[in-house]
Amino acid sequence: MKRASHKRKRSTNPTACPCVYKYLSCAPSFQHTAAIYASIMARTPMIALHLLVALCILSSVRTSSSAPSDVDGFIGCLSAAIPPSLIHTPATNSYSSLLLASVRNLRYVLPGTTRPLLIVAVTEPAHVQATVVCGRRHSVRIRTRSGGHDYEGLSYASVDPDQHFAVLDLGELRAISIDASRSEAWVGSGATLGELYYAAAAANQTFGFPAGNCPTVGVGGHLSGGGFGALSRKYGLSADQVIDAVVVDAEGRLLNRSTMGKDLFWAIRGGGGESFGVVLSWKVRLVAVPETVTVFSIRRLRNESAVDLITKWQAISPALPRDLYLRVLVQNQQANFIALFLGRCGGLVDTMRARFPELGMTEQDCQEMSWVKSTVFFFYNTADRPAEVLLDRRNANYYLKVKSDHVAEPIPGEALESIWTKWLEKPEAALIMLDPYGGRMRSIPPSATPFPHRDYLYQFQFFSFWFENGTAALERRLSWVRGVYEDLTPYVSKNPRAVYVNYRDLDIGTNELEGNVTSYAKARVWGEKYFKGNFKRLAAVKSMVDPDDFFRNEQSIPPLPAAKR
């Protein structure tokens, strides 16, 4: 077994010494806490004893979340359990640099955006437990950031000036431990997809993982929203590969799959990353990939039948063999058809000639490489860079607005022509991504995880990014992305208009409070677009694990009212 680090072997018996037994005994549930402690000791013994300090605070935490925030008391509480160097307030020199370190969307650092009261840069599970416990005690809510790719900034900012919250930054909880004999891995929520891809391939070139095409996305947020990518047609979503997880709940308890229960385990695998607790790490199933895969990138201009090809692609791509993923990127007046084939060039050429001859793909378009190098190709559009670029956690900062859609029936060619003429010839036109569904992810029932959109043909993503500051630039870009979204209304999913929760969009609705909990009726407006019929079950889970609605933001899952249960 390969580990991220090697430690001296220690006893995994949590009652091996009187002081440990004493600390564990003061926790709300001795049996499940002891079991989790033993599991953590077995995997990462150096942090196990530190968990105990936070556990002893738990039984006294019943403070009402409706009380005014006690920031000084919160900081004092944190300082008793967490090294002060990890607590960053606006008065510290490190606050702004840490806040901005993983911010991707500059819209949410503009004046008028509510920033966190403080950031806790946790380095071990006990720090997370203490932050939740202290937050409950002093009425300071917690938001969790793993990679910072949240399109609407909800993991580190708020558009509501009345929000008072702290941020748990999980960036240092990024250990990856590969069990090659079982084709499994434990992955910290603070790891990036690129780090996971690199570690899997380093353990065995035939290990892969089905997740997104951007390597700097954080594992925690990605898996919490379902996780779609180039291997999803072959193996399903990222969340479909999760076999265990370690979670800190609203009471500050450390839970795994056996102690959290089946409902919470279902909810965290696609129900969004801000509603039920803090997922510290995930145990995932690695998937088999061949030693050599093939990719291509074929560009077609509008006068080279780009629209006709996209029209045909709509029906062809979801029905292709599961070993072939063929997406389209539309930008700068051209369509780029990009493929990953789990096999050699000859097999790909045969498949394309039989299923999509209109594209004109030939052997000269093939590039053969390892699977891990294909992840480099998909992000950088070249395989010339070394696989080590996957370990670079930095990303470009820009202003961003994204909307997404799902398509159940192919859009007529004339409608696509009209959209192209009206919108894609404008200078502020965004990048449009079309990703095919089908294959394995379609064969899994929509209720198996909170992600319900498995039956669609494909997904649209309208990715508008820009670097120019100022209101005029902002209004032009927002007007474009909202305008094309409106014009597509007759051709996309309806009742509800389906949206992928990892492409967060505040335009579809935000939460309102009833008393001191989020309104279920108001949240349904946006919630059923993300989760369809699974939304009510998610709210039922919320009412079981966080009935006081401690973990909440503008689009967090509300507790299900008693009358609805």
Image: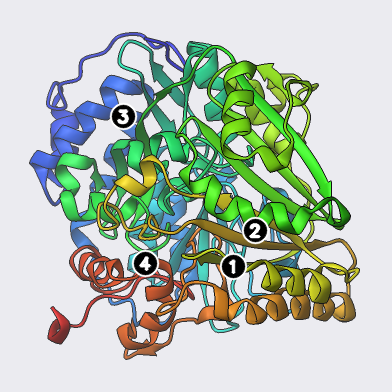
Of circles 3 and 4, the one toward us is 4
Q: Verify CB contact (< 8 Å) between mark 1 and mark 2.
A: yes
Q: Verify CB contact (< 8 Å) between mark 2 and mark 4.
A: no
Instruction: Check disc 2 and give the amino acid type.
Output: Thr
In the drawing, what numbered circle is on residue 531?
Answer: 4
Q: CA distance from mark 3 to mark 4?
A: 36 Å
Q: CA distance from mark 3 to mark 1?
A: 55 Å
Of circles 3 and 1, the one toward us is 1
Instruction: Find numbered disc 4 in the image and state the secondary structure of the residue it sits on.
Output: helix
- In this rendering, the answer to whether 522 lies above or below 549 is below
* Towards the viewer: 32 or 52: 32
- Examine the rendering and report whether any part of residue 297 can be seen: yes
Instruction: Check disc 1 and give the amino acid type.
Output: Ile
Q: Which residue is mark 3?
A: 48
Mark 4 or mark 1: which comes first in sequence?
1
Residue 446 picture location, percent across and down: 30, 57
Residue at 43% x, 34% y: name it. Answer: 234
Residue 403 picture location, percent across and down: 62, 68
